[in-house]
Image (cartoon, helix red, strand yellow):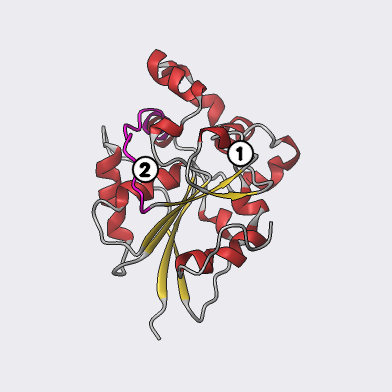
């Protein structure tokens, strides 16, 4: 039996280590992990996404992206045929952004973010994972590995300026009801994980391990599985 290739894309500045607790049955799935590349000079998100598809070596894969990685895999699906696109702790369009991000876009306040501070692990963890991280900073230090200034400048701008307004109805969205980066009140048509925060890829790994195979194989029923 041919295994289903599943490619994982981490969140902003994160390493593939964020997936270390995710295990799909190796009898049915083969897992691959994409890493952030340093963007080229003035590279658009769409061009970056096209370049990232060169790392996908299988036909008709499943793409799974977390947070900004969820935005990226949606753009990657423009260039390759995919079996499924699954986003976790992310958004399907800029209409799901919280108000603070919309304000940052309209005022260009994101340009005032001191990247030197964001390169600090505490500030980077808060930006990437939300506010409730102080007790877990040592844990996150190994997950937030990309601190290159050009990448951080580019990534923050690409998130804030993401121009998608039309939702791809084929995208499967998994979201925690306690996400403080992309609050659930702004999110429509998603699989809700009770108690899930923006970092639920780590903290809700039991739910994800139990339910991701069902979601990929179209066997998932809303409301079932571990919480």
- Extreme residue in the top direction: 107
Q: In the displayed structure, does residue 56 sit left or right of residue 146? A: left
Q: Is residue 215 visible?
A: yes
- Label 1: few (<14), some (14–19) or many (≥20) C-alpha neighbours in 10 Å: many
The residue under the point 36% across, 54% down is: 170
**Magenta-highlighted stretch: main secondary structure?**
loop
Q: In the displayed structure, does residue 154 sit left or right of residue 213? A: left
Q: Is residue 15 above or below residue 46?
A: below
Q: Which is in the foreground here, disc 1 or disc 2?
A: 1
The residue under the point 23% across, 54% down is: 79
Residue 182 percent coordinates (x, y): 54, 35
Number of numbered tags placed on the structure image: 2
- Label 2: few (<14), some (14–19) or many (≥20) C-alpha neighbours in 10 Å: some
The residue that label 1 is drawn on is: 179
Residue 137 percent coordinates (x, y): 69, 40
* Range of residues picked out in magenta: 155-170
Residue 31 percent coordinates (x, y): 47, 68
The residue under the point 48% across, 40% down is: 188
- Extreme residue in the front direction: 222
Mark number for residue 38?
A: 2
Please name whichever residue, 220 or 70, is drawn nearer the observer in this view of the structure. Answer: 220
In space, the residues marked 1 and 2 are separated at their CA atoms by: 28 Å
């Amino acid at each position: 039996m041919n295994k289903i290739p599943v490619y994982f894309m981490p969140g902003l500045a994160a390493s593939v280590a964020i997936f270390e607790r995710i295990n799909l049955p190796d009898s049915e799935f083969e897992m691959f992990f994409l890493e952030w590349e340093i963007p080229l000079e003035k590279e658009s998100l769409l061009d970056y996404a096209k370049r990232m598809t060169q790392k996908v070596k299988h036909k008709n894969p499943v793409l799974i992206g977390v947070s900004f990685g969820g935005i990226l895999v949606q753009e990657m699906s423009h260039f390759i045929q995919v079996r499924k696109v699954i986003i976790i702790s992310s958004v399907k369009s800029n209409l799901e952004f919280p108000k603070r991000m919309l304000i940052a876009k309209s005022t260009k306040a994101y340009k005032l973010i001191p990247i030197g501070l964001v390169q600090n692990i505490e500030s980077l963890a808060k930006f990437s994972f939300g506010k409730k991280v102080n007790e877990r900073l040592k844990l996150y230090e190994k997950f937030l590995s990309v601190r290159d200034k050009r990448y951080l400048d580019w990534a923050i701008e690409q998130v804030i300026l993401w121009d998608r307004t039309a939702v791809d109805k084929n995208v499967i969205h998994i979201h925690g009801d306690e996400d403080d980066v992309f609050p659930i009140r702004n999110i429509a048509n998603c699989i809700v994980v009770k108690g899930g925060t923006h970092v639920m890829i780590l903290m809700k790994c039991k739910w994800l391990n139990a339910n991701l195979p069902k979601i990929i194989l179209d066997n998932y029923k809303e409301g079932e599985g571990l919480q």
